[in-house]
Image (cartoon, rainbow, N blue to C red):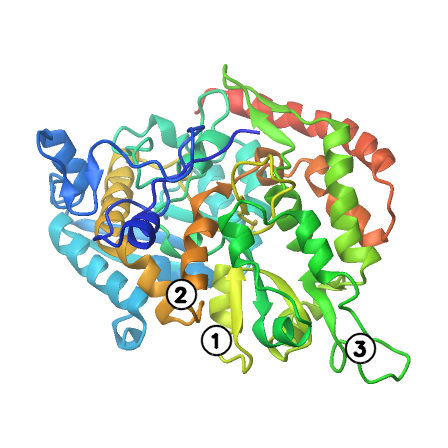
Amino acid sequence: MQMRQSRSRLMALLLAGLMLFSSLTVLAGCADGEGDATATETGSGVQSGSSAEDETKAAPYTNLEKKKYNRDFVVLGRGDMKTDFEAISTESKGSLLNELLVERNTVVEEDFGIKFVYFYENSYDEVNARVSQQALNSLDDYDVAMGHKYTVTSCLVNNQLTDLSTVDTLALTENWWDQGCRSSLTVNGKLFLMTGDVLPSSMLISACFAFNKRLMKELNKTEPYSLVREGKWTLDEFNAMTKDVTADVDGDGVIDYKKDRYGLSSWMMDVPFTMFYGAGGMFGSVTEDGTLEMSFEDEDVINRYEKIYRALIEQNAYFVTDLSQYETSYEMFAAGHALFYDTSLNKVRNFLADMSDDYGIVPVPKYDTNQKEYLSFVNGSTGFVMMVSTEKDPAYVGAILEAMARYNYENVSTKMFEIVTKLQSVRDQDSSEMVEYIIRNRVFDSAYFFDLAVSNVVLEQLKTGKPEISAQLTSAKKTSKTELRRILRTMSKKQK
């Protein structure tokens, strides 16, 4: 699969100890080696001999030409990510991210003569319904909408979204837009969903593992930081570390998540994807000529599944397959009943801040040592900006989104490391270093984000607890071919 090399500001802070300088969301394509510095950026800004263009890239918002529009900018948002747009001044105290976004909104409103207006829906389906209503009735109620993976495909296949690559005021190839997202979700030259610095909280939706330091010590195990640094943190190492950890501690004959101990705590909508993509799996890819295709070998999927099956099923991990019991996966880890917890940076921040035991975080294990990078799955709850196909002034919408992305890149994302650590997502210097590994290479699988059946094959088979995956893989491929044709038909249509 294509490996993604980041030139993150986080890496600059952690590895060079200099002023943070580049975006957390840069997920560049294949590059040799990890952590290569760019030729024009350093921790202290622009190198000697740089051009005016270099200066603009170093301070993209400061050097952006400001135009007064004297109009509203109407946002249709997801309730779970509303603060990415609507920062609330009364709530900014004690929240560095919100405080920074309050300042961003004030500056952008003043510089561009706009006023942000917000409408929010807690249901993803309701956001889609409003997008569809606007498209079907040729309305222009909302300038931008925040989409969600699990529902937005219906808007796409019904030709209700604007191809963002046609909006001249969006500089989508620049560092303040997530290049991993752009390369994976651009099909036939068209891109309908995008993320990046414009949505700061989306960067926190990066998969990782948390571990309990007390249990590590009690079980005479070595914290995996050194393995990570040496490139040896693999599924085999993880399976060896969690083997025989699950136990009936109180001896009552039943292993209970409230009283006993598990090697891993996990939830079905996260861990199958976290471990598969972390191990280099990929179901969909975009070819050099821009076509979306399924490009994987059955043997590769089977080999990865065997190791994931061992970790979850054979070693009796706490694997939540009841959606209504989702909370127990993090509650039992927070209570000290699991050695590891499959999670993401935003969940660590939200659910583990008050955990009594000390914990650390590490990236998701590689498949083996031949895998060059640690890869962090980006799950379906990440936010995307999208524009309805009937938008009457795409250039205006693009200009404001571009301004927000540039401002965040220059003034907000530079402080993301501080945002994460201040919110107690990490409690030690080792874990602070791990944040960089986690955000360095974020994975967007086009098959997953376009809802092809094959993307759920690992999830569905793990739910059954069966070791064989070949038959389900064959069946899912057949279904996916039909779904893929539907997506490609939409991606080849001319917009109305």
Q: Tell us which disc is closer to us: 2 or 1.
A: 2
User: x and y percent of residue 175 in the render?
Assistant: 31, 38
User: Would residue 404 appear left or right of 485 to someone viewing this image?
Assistant: left
- In the image, 322: left or right of 79? right
Density class for disc 1 (Cα within 10 Å; few <14, some 14-19, many ≥20) is some
Position of residue 133 measured from the top left corner of the image (x, y, whole percent): 49, 45
Distance of mark 2 from mark 1, alpha carbons?
A: 16 Å
Residue displayed at 80% across by 34% down: 473
Q: Amino acid at mark 2?
A: Gln
**N-term-proximal mark, 3 vs 1:** 3
Q: Which residue is at the front of the view, 342 or 488?
A: 342
Q: SS of the residue at dot 3?
A: loop
* In the image: residue 304, left or right of residue 343: right
Q: Is residue 213 visible?
A: yes
Location of residue 446 by image quarter: top right
Mark 2 or 1, nearer chain start: 1
Residue 353, numbered circle = 1
Q: Which mark is residue 256?
A: 3
In the image, residue 464 sits, relative to residue 38, either above or below, namely below
Residue 211 placement: quadrant: bottom right
Three-letter code for the amino acid on which mark 1 is drawn = Ala
Within-10-Å neighbours for mark 2: few <14, some 14–19, many 20+: few
Label 3 amino acid?
Asp
State whether residue 363 is above or below residue 256.
above
| Cα distance in 3D space between marks 3 and 1 | 24 Å
Q: Between residues 320 and 133, which one lies in front from this camera angle?
A: 320
- Which of discs 3 and 2 lies nearer the camera? The answer is 2
Rounded to the nearest angstrom, the CA distance separating label 3 from label 2 is: 33 Å
